[in-house]
Image (cartoon, rainbow, N blue to C red):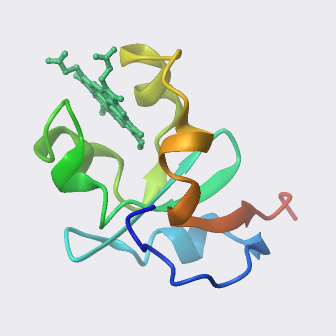
Amino acid sequence: MYGGLKGKPPRRDITLEEVALHKTQEDAWTVIRGQVYNLTPYMKYHPGGAKILFAVMGKDGTKMFDRYHPWVNIDFLLSGCLVGRLAAPA
Ligand code: HEM
């Protein structure tokens, strides 16, 4: 969906430092419940608007996500935008 990652296999080793490098509208990653997503292709479709997503670009967005809509099925909606899994803390 959305062709976010063009079929690349998910990675398991992504650190928060790497996520933090992707914090612009043209290149926006976020973490929701330990999974790293490329938000860029989804932003324009977000029912809550693109602007509010600026708050979570390059960061762990789980708290914000759960504050607004813990019931939203992110696995389904962003399945094509999954970059991989956040690395375990060192
Ligand atoms: C990152 C993945 C996200 C996905 C897939 C997503 C998806 C959605 C969906 C499907 C809705 C409609 C829900 C409904 O009507 O029941 C929605 C609404 C909304 N989202 Fe998100 N969301 C995401 C992240 C966020 C984040 C991080 C925030 C806050 C910083 C946020 C704030 C909102 C707000 C405020 C609405 C309500 C819009 C309205 O009803 O006027 N979302 N989102």
Q: Quadrant of residue 7?
A: bottom right
Identified at 53% across, 15% down, the residue is 71
Q: Relative to 22, say whether 16 is above or below.
A: above
What is the x, y in percent for residue 13?
Answer: 79, 74
Q: Is residue 53 left or right of residue 39?
A: left
Q: Relative to 32, say whether 64 is above or below.
A: above
- Judge by depth and name the residue closer to the eye, 39 or 4: 4
What is the x, y in percent for residue 73?
Answer: 55, 29
- Judge by depth and name the residue closer to the eye, 51 or 47: 47
Q: Is residue 90 left or right of residue 32?
A: right
How many numbered tags mark residues here? 0
> Which image quarter has ligand 1?
top left
What is the x, y in percent for residue 40?
Answer: 30, 66
Identified at 50% across, 27% down, the residue is 63
Q: Relative to 26, say whether 32 is above or below.
A: above
Q: Quadrant of residue 68?
A: top left
Q: Is residue 65 left or right of residue 79?
A: left
Q: Is residue 47 left or right of residue 6?
A: left
The residue furthest front is 1
Identified at 48% across, 43% down, the residue is 77
- Judge by depth and name the residue closer to the eye, 75 or 18: 75
